[in-house]
Image (cartoon, helix red, strand yellow):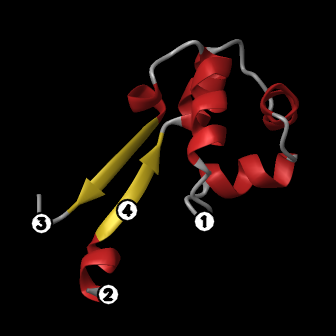
Amino acid sequence: MSTDMEKSELKNQVRRLRFENGEMTQQQLADKTGVTRQTIIAIEAGKYAPSLTLAFRIAKAFAVPIGNVFQYENEDS
């Protein structure tokens, strides 16, 4: 089962969306979503998968569907 998890990865478009939205800073996004700048940095780097609630707040901050921000990729599918 652990091998399935290793083949799966959550991708995100947070950095691209920030730049497409008036070059929003990481701090501005953090303020809009109620988290720290360090959390935004970790999400952008793919080192942290946000909670579902936070993922929806990030999508709302960009006024896009959640699927435009986060993509779940699995090599088996």
User: What's the residue type where badge 3 is placed?
Assistant: Asp
Foreground disc of the pair 3, 2: 2
User: What's the residue type where badge 1 is placed?
Assistant: Lys
Q: Residues within 10 Å of mark 3 (few under 14, many from 20)?
A: few
Q: Nearer the N terminus, badge 1 or badge 3? A: 1
Which residue is label 3 attached to? Answer: 76
Which residue is label 2 attached to? Answer: 2
- The answer to whether the residues at label 1 and label 2 have Cβ atoms under 8 Å apart is no
Q: From what the image shows, is residue 1 above or below residue 11?
A: below
In this rendering, would 11 be left or right of 37? Answer: left
Q: From what the image shows, is residue 24 above or below residue 39?
A: above
Q: Nearer the N terminus, badge 1 or badge 4? A: 4
The residues tagged by marks 1 and 3 sit, at their Cα atoms, a distance apart of: 22 Å
The secondary element bearing badge 1 is classed as: loop
Q: Residues within 10 Å of mark 1 (few under 14, many from 20)?
A: few
The secondary element bearing badge 2 is classed as: helix
Foreground disc of the pair 2, 4: 2
The disc placed on residue 47 is 1
